[in-house]
Image (tube, rainbow, N blue to C red):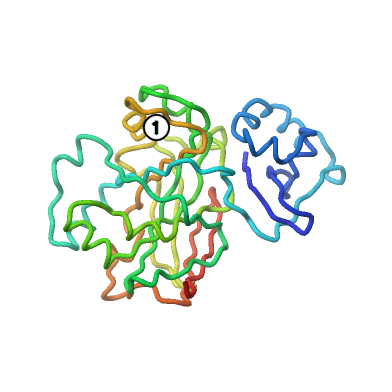
Amino acid sequence: MKIARIRSDEGRSVAVYGKGRWIDLSTVLNDSIENIERSLFSVITKNREKIQKFIEETPSEEMVEVVPRTMLIPVPKVNQIRDFYAFEEHVRRSRESRGLEMVPEWYEFPAFYYSGTSNLFGSNDPIPYPSYSSEVDYELEVGAVIGKEGRNISRGEAREYIFGLVLMNDWSARDVQRKEMKIGLGPAKSKDFATSFGPFIVSMDELVDMTNQEGKIDVDLSASVNGNHYSSGNLKSIHWDFEDMIAWASQETTLRPGDIMMSGTVGTGCILEIGHEEYGWLKRGDTVQFHSDILGDTSNKLTEA
């Protein structure tokens, strides 16, 4: 199931996708958007069969279609964002670019930092270029949206706490990040100017057939700048998967609905890896596009702050 928050000419809606259109969820559940958004994940989970039956059995002409003017951030309330460092290729290549080798501690547990939640953007929103940087980069990532509360979650139980996945971009100011990492406290200001979301959440039941025998989810991802292809990757190449992240993050800590576990950058999923000497850092006026057959598309233009 695909779930989105949409602004149309009629106002704001929560919608599910079916029969080639976005369907207003308020009319399916006979409830207000405020009530649905207040407990979105539990509402969807509780009414999943009812929603699917409505999509399958209701004639198209009787559905209340939502025509998007803007795709809003699909998570009504983002609590905390933990951004992990989970793809070995990205970690290795990024460290090599700074003349560093892999550290053995990276293989001990899935490391993460806390990303800010003050500057969150939708899939087509303009991104203000940070005034304090001249080396802005994109990072091609996927976020796991936590759908229910849990603490000290085992790895074997972890997937049931994931409501779904969403495409994400962890925008980065590389010149500031370089200095922060030398200090040994960060990344922080190099990251908090923008985090952007894909257009919708794909619920985990839709990803069962895309999960391989190792439990890794087979989702292709790509990035382009101004229409020129820059990056390709796949979520299945992840070393520390979302179950690992949840099990580690929840030790002696409570995870809540609306928490986001970001995967970290897929291998080759940023300019830092593919080479700023050849590609150049992002400039004001550049448009960064992400694509996934499963998770949708984003297109964000960098503008003056």
Where in the figure is residue 22, as x and y percent of width and height? 72, 48
Q: Identify the residue shown where x is 21% and y is 63%.
A: 179
240 over 183 or under it: above or below: above
Q: In this view, does 265 lie to the left or right of 297?
A: left
**Which residue occupies the extreme right position in the image?**
62
Q: Nearer the viewer, residue 250 or 237?
A: 250
264 over 277 or under it: above or below: above
Q: In which quarter of the image is the N terminus?
A: top right
Q: Nearer the viewer, residue 54 or 11?
A: 11
Where in the figure is residue 249, as x and y percent of width and height? 34, 33
Q: Identify the residue shown where x is 46% and y is 74%.
A: 286
- Report which quarter residue 16 is drawn in: top right
Q: Mark 1 points at which residue?
A: 215
Q: Identify the residue shown where x is 44% and y is 59%.
A: 194
- Report which quarter residue 60 is drawn in: top right
- How many numbered dots are placed on residues in this image? 1
Q: Is mark 1 on a helix, strand or loop?
A: loop
Where in the figure is residue 65, as x and y percent of width and height? 79, 49
Near mark 1 (Cα within 10 A), the count class, few <14, some 14-19 or many ≥20, is: few
Q: In this view, does 94 lie to the left or right of 156?
A: left
Q: Is residue 23 left or right of residue 147?
A: right
Q: Identify the residue shown where x is 40% and y is 49%.
A: 234
Disc 1 marks which amino acid?
Answer: Gly
123 over 20 or under it: above or below: below
